[in-house]
Image (cartoon, rainbow, N blue to C red):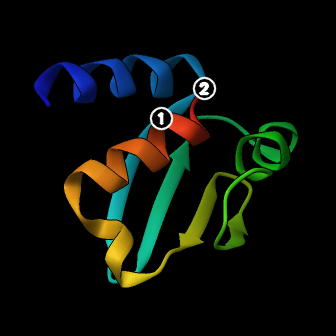
Amino acid sequence: MLLDLAGLRIRASRLGLKSIVASGLDLIFLFSDDHAGKAESLFAAVSGKVRISDPKTVRLRLAENYFEPRTLITILRKILR
C-alpha cells in the first residue's frame, strides 16, 4: 500500500497537483497552477459529481463506500493515469 501511495504522489506531482484531501464525501484536488485544461481530461472517466470551486480547486463528490482505502487508491489511480 505504501508503494501505491508513493506512485500516486509522483503522478499527482507530474500533473501539477499540490494535494488531494478527503473532506466528508469529497476529494479536494488542489493544483499549483490554473487547472482549467487538465480538469476536464482528468475527471472525464470518473463517476461522481465534479465541482470546480476556483481556478486551482476541484471537488469530487463520491459515494461513502468509495472511501475504503483500496477502493480509493483504485479511483485515484484511474484519475491520475
Q: Say which residue appears at 66% left-offset and 66% top-offset.
A: 47
Rendered-image quadrant of the C terminus: top right
- Name the residue tied to disc 2: 81
Residue at the image position 46 percent from the left and 81 percent from the top: 63
Residue 80 placement: quadrant:
top right
Type of amino acid under label 1? Arg
Residue tagged 1: 77
Q: Say if mark 1 contacts mark 2, CB within 8 Å.
A: yes
Q: Position of residue 7 (x, y in %)?
A: 33, 18
Check the image and report above or below for 20 versus 37.
below
Amino acid type shown at disc 2? Arg
The residue drawn where x is 39% and y is 16% is: 10
Q: Residues within 10 Å of mark 2 (few under 14, many from 20)?
A: few
Q: Nearer the viewer, residue 53 or 69?
A: 69
At which x and y percent is residue 62? Answer: 50, 75
* 17 on left or right of 47: left
